[in-house]
Image: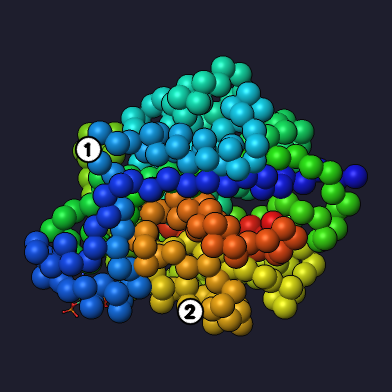
């Protein structure tokens, strides 16, 4: 018998304030048409003053627990993927643990920028498969609006805030690709590409900083690396492209999403797309897409998903799982 980490519940939270592209036309030399055509984004949510990453993470986690029919007492571990924690420490995950009323188990953050949720899923899967935890809340939560340089039109129109969560539950499987749950994980990073996507500040340099990006360079790496990591994860399962029911990509840019699907020879009807409504919410984008996709009736029990992301580092990866 094999132990599999099965997604038993999913939930998300988006801040109340919705910002349409037209709002940027008032302060920047940009247009709704440019933003839509270059990125596919129409609107995004921004956190209210005082609304933090951990607040949003808690709301998404509570919804995932409800969806799974479980309570915080059932959870052994919490992994939060974020690059925008409330404080440098303690971790956002321990803040979530306290706000959920959990007094046992363990909690920690994972920082792999936009690939954070994939890295968190991979680590949570390892905890479950190795018997260190039976139920793990995996959360992606971000307040990227707080990292923006509002005078830089090439970045500030692309990002948004939000949170999504899944509850992973240890369930028995046969050890083959018909099992429900996580079937394969493929993680990669290459620190030589630091300068094309980074924040120019941090604690150790006694600065705050804003997100800086060479968009065209990131784009060039993204399609190639996302297709390669998706194929690698799929290959580890022994399945083929024809077996894929859904691609759930990191939601950065519709052109990257389309380009990757094309390279994988997967039709867009099989791709979950939310970038038009959320913008790029970094580590939150995949659990948000899973939650919205499920609510839209797209992800059904037994279907094969490949989910993939790339972000600052560069760090990238993919997870193949059966819903
Ligand atoms: N409005 C109007 N014009 C703009 C805007 C804007 N908001 N932003 C840039 N431009 C201008 C540029 O200044 C440039 O003008 P120039 O030719 O006079 O110099 C022109 O538009 C074209 O700029 P490009 O950067 O070549 O435009 P491109 O088609 O590459 O689109 C974009 C830019 C959307 C950033 C694209 O490169 C992209 O999506 N890259 C990937 C970025 C991304 O997804 N990052 C996130 C992934 S990793 C992560 O999630 C952290």
| Image location of residue 5, percent across then percent down | 72, 45
Q: Residue at x 45, y 50 (%)?
A: 284
Picture quadrant of residue 321 = bottom right
Label 1 crowd (10 A; few <14 / some 14-19 / many >=20): few
> Could you tell me if the residues under marks 1 and 2 are in contact, i.e. CB atoms within 8 Å?
no
User: Relative to residue 54, is residue 292 drawn left or right?
Assistant: right
**Residue at x-position 21% and y-position 73%:** 32
Residue 318 horizontal side relative to residue 15, left or right: right
Which one is nearer the viewer's eye here, 274 or 123? 274
Residue identifier under label 1: 49
Q: Residues within 10 Å of mark 2 (few under 14, many from 20)?
A: some
Residue at the image point whose x is 31% and y is 53% from the top? 45
Regarding residue 142, the answer to whether it shows in the image is yes
Q: Is residue 260 above or below residue 44?
A: below
Camera-nearest residue between 202 and 299? 299
Q: Which label lies toward us, 1 or 2?
A: 1
Residue 229 visible in the snapshot: no
Tell me the SS state at disc 2.
helix
Mark 2 lies on residue = 259
Of the two numbered discs 1 and 2 on the same chain, state the one appearing first in sequence: 1
Q: In the rendering, which numbered label is found on residue 198? A: none
Instruction: Examine the rendered structure and indicate whether residue 103 appears above or below residue 315.
Output: above
Taking the image in four quarters, ligand 1 sits in the one at bottom left
Q: CA distance from mark 1 to mark 2?
A: 36 Å
Question: In the picture provided, is 211 more to the left or to the right than 222?
Answer: left
- The residue at 48%/41% (across/down) is 60
In the rendered view of the protein, which quadrant contains the C terminus? bottom right
Q: Is residue 35 above or below residue 74?
A: below
Q: Nearer the viewer, residue 146 or 228?
A: 146
**Residue 133 picture quarter:** top right
Q: Estimate the x, y position of residue 114 in percent, counting from the top left.
A: 44, 54
- Please state the horizontal and vertical placement of residue 126, each as a whole percent of the image: 69, 42
């Amino acid at each position: 018998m094999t132990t599999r980490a099965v997604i038993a519940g999913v939930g998300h939270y988006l801040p109340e304030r919705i910002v349409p592209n037209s709002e940027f036309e008032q302060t920047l030399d940009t247009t709704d048409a440019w933003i839509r055509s270059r990125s596919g984004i129409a609107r995004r949510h921004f956190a209210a003053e005082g609304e933090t990453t951990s607040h949003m993470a808690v709301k998404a986690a509570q919804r995932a627990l409800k969806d799974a029919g479980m309570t915080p007492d059932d959870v052994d571990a919490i992994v939060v993927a974020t690059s925008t924690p409330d404080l440098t420490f303690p971790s956002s995950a321990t803040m979530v643990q306290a706000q959920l009323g959990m007094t046992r188990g363990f909690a920690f953050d994972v920082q792999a920028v936009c690939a954070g949720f994939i890295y968190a899923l991979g680590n949570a899967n390892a905890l479950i498969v190795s018997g260190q935890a039976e139920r793990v809340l995996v959360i992606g939560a971000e307040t990227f609006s707080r990292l923006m340089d509002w005078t830089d039109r090439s970045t500030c129109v692309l990002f948004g805030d939000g949170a999504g969560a899944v509850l992973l539950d240890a369930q028995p499987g046969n050890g083959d690709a018909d099992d429900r749950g996580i079937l394969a994980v493929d993680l990669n990073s290459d620190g030589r590409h630091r300068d094309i996507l980074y924040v120019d500040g941090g604690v150790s340099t006694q600065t705050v900083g804003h997100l800086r990006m060479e968009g065209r360079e990131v784009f060039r790496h993204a399609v190639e690396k996302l297709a390669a990591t998706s194929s690698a994860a799929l290959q580890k399962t022994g399945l083929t492209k024809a077996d894929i029911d859904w691609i759930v990509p990191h939601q950065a840019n519709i052109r990257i999403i389309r380009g990757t699907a094309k390279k994988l020879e997967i039709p867009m009807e099989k791709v979950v797309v939310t970038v038009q409504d959320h913008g790029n919410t970094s580590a939150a984008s995949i659990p948000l897409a899973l939650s919205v996709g499920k609510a839209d009736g797209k992800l059904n029990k037994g279907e094969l998903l490949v989910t993939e992301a790339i972000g600052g580092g560069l760090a990238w990866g993919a997870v193949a799982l059966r819903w």
